[in-house]
């Protein structure tokens, strides 16, 4: 009996030592793996976060402004006033509604992808995402005063925004962000140059097609990312303004 107890103790001691060695080895493996992937992982997270910031600057705000321009139509303006007066939880439901309504379109995109229609699925998914983002951005602006009356929402928002601002400040100081800004500036310059080269051709084509002249005025104020704030006016040749000497402009 004593021999059996001694053997059991030796077995338990061996198991304990083996467990300690295994845990130590696992710890060393994890630390070594983390040291190897830490740099690339942080760089990848910076890239993802930089893309989110770029989307916020290039996507969220312009799309929200685009939807806001529709408010010049009376039905849209009335709907926006109604949404702005919603109680807190009704405003929260309104904010979640666009994503819910577009879920079927995402399932259709998955079905198209499964059936080999890659381009159609991609375009449908991107279109649904852009539409959802535009509507949600505008709804958030309209419903934010009501949403901030919800205790947990206000707490989460007040916690998230300083954290996001601090994180974005770090990202804006990274090489990924600086490179993205360079790419953005070069893209805007390329688009502006292409527009300057294409505009006379468009005007000439329109004149040949309709007999009317395109006049590029300055009626709209300059906005960031616009083509020098120019507005397009279509004016018949007979309706062109005349100078004081009676000749056409």
Image (cartoon, rainbow, N blue to C red):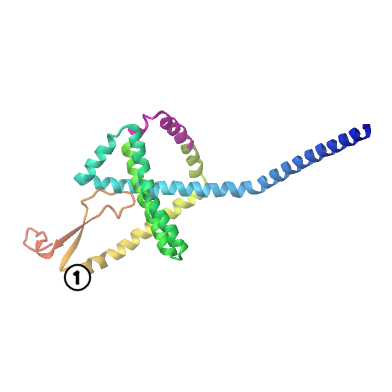
Q: Quadrant of the N terminus?
A: top right
Residue 141 in the image: state x and y as whole percent.
33, 39
**In the image as oriented, which residue stretches furthest toward the front?**
1
Q: Quadrant of the C terminus?
A: bottom left
Left or right relative to 196: residue 45: right
Left or right relative to 67: residue 4: right
Q: Tell which of 91 and 25 is nearer to you.
A: 91
Q: Is 19 covered by the magenta stretch? A: no
Residue 109 can be seen in this image: yes
Give the answer, above or below, for where 209 lies relative to 36: below
Q: Tell which of 154 and 6 is nearer to you.
A: 6
Residue 186 can be seen in this image: no
Q: Tell which of 206 and 103 is nearer to you.
A: 103
Q: Which residue is mark 1?
A: 209
Residue drawn at x 17%, y 68% as measured from the top left: 210
Left or right relative to 19: residue 34: left
Q: Main secondary structure of the magenta part?
A: helix
Magenta segment: 144-163
Q: Is 156 covered by the magenta stretch? A: yes
């Amino acid at each position: 009996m004593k021999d059996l107890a001694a053997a059991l103790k030796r077995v338990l001691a061996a198991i304990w030592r083996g467990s300690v060695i295994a845990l130590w080895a696992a710890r060393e493996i994890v630390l070594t793996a983390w040291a190897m992937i830490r740099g690339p992982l942080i760089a990848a997270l910076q890239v993802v976060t930089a893309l989110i910031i770029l989307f916020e600057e290039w996507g969220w705000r312009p799309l929200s402004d685009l939807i806001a321009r529709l408010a010049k139509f009376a039905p849209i303006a009335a709907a926006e006033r109604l949404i702005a007066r919603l109680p807190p939880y009704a405003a929260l439901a309104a904010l979640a509604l666009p994503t819910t309504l577009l879920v079927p379109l995402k399932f259709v995109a998955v079905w198209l992808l499964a059936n080999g229609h890659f381009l159609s699925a991609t375009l449908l998914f991107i279109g649904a995402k852009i539409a959802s983002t535009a509507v949600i951005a505008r709804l958030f602006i309209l419903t934010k005063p009501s949403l901030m009356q919800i205790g947990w929402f206000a707490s989460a928002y007040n916690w998230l925004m300083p954290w996001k601002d601090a994180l974005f400040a770090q990202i804006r100081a990274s090489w990924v962000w600086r490179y993205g800004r360079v790419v953005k500036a070069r893209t805007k310059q390329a688009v502006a140059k292409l527009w300057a080269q294409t505009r006379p051709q468009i005007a000439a084509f329109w004149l040949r097609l309709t007999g009317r002249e395109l006049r590029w005025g300055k009626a709209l104020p300059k906005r960031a990312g616009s083509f020098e704030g120019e507005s397009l006016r279509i004016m018949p040749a007979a309706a062109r303004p005349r100078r004081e000497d009676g000749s056409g402009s």
